[in-house]
Amino acid sequence: MEPVPPLSPELLVYAYQQGVFPMADAADGPIYWYAPDPRGIIPLDQFYVSKNLRKLVRKEAFTVRTDTAFEAVMRACAERAETWISDEIIAAYVALHELDAAHSVECWQAGALVGGLYGVALGGAFFGESMFHRARDASKVALVHLVARLKAGGYTLLDTQFTTPHLEQFGAAEIPREVYEQRLDHALAVNANWHVSYTALDY
């Protein structure tokens, strides 16, 4: 497997349209393309929110913002013992964000960024990349707001790349790569709107 060429927004868009995405093998390591089979997704019509999380969201314990600290969210997601988010990846996705094709959902508390997530939005597909939390359940609240925005904006695919026990509690599931590619083709043809007003848990 050969490392990918220098990343650019154009290359990232093309890659996501083909169902592949980049990951570095270390914070300063080479970057490779990945296309998992099976693929992890969260069906938007089956997204599950527990009773306790619903209460927390309605309590508005966090101030939820969008796209006000994209790079900070990425760097927070990279703060772990082993990370695939290198400086080159951060620079490429920040450039993609400046083209309005990558977005962050952020949870703030007392003026501090305490949780959030980021991903890529193309057509009616949102490709979730990573999430983090510095306050309990902050990333979960960000995910609830993300799904509410995606539903309101007409998105049809929430790609999680892989599944984890954390994501499975929200309804994440694995589908064969062939099925994923069919859903991706359909989603890319959708004219969804990220910049839409929404109400969390309004579903």
Image (spheres, rainbow, N blue to C red):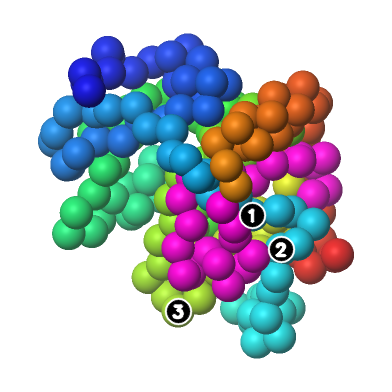
SS at badge 1: loop
SS at badge 3: loop
Residue in the image at 34% along x and 27% along y: 33
Task: Indicate the position of residue 79 as horizontal and vertical percent values.
Answer: 25, 56
Residue stretch rendered in magenta on the structure: 151-174
Q: Quadrant of residue 201?
A: bottom right
Which residue type carries mark 2?
Phe
Q: Residues within 10 Å of mark 2 (few under 14, many from 20)?
A: some
Residue in the image at 52% along x and 44% along y: 39
Between 34 and 50, the one nearer to me in the picture: 34
Q: Which residue is mark 1?
A: 42
SS at badge 2: loop
- Alpha-carbon distance for marks 3 and 1? 22 Å
Q: Which residue is mark 3?
A: 136
Q: Is residue 129 magenta?
A: no
Q: Is residue 110 above or below residue 31?
A: below
- Alpha-carbon distance for marks 1 and 2? 7 Å
Q: Is residue 89 above or below residue 196?
A: above
Which residue type carries mark 1?
Ile
Q: Please tell me which of labels 2 and 3 falls first in the chain.
A: 2
Q: Which mark is residue 47?
A: 2
* Callout 1 touching callout 2 (CB < 8 Å): yes
Between 174 and 55, the one nearer to me in the picture: 174
From the image, which quarter does the C terminus lie in? Answer: bottom right
Residue in the image at 42% along x and 75% along y: 135
In this rendering, the label closer to the viewer, 2 or 3: 2
Task: Indicate the position of residue 160 as horizontal and vertical percent values.
Answer: 53, 48
- Residue 125 seen in render: no
Does 201 sit left or right of 183 as displayed?
right
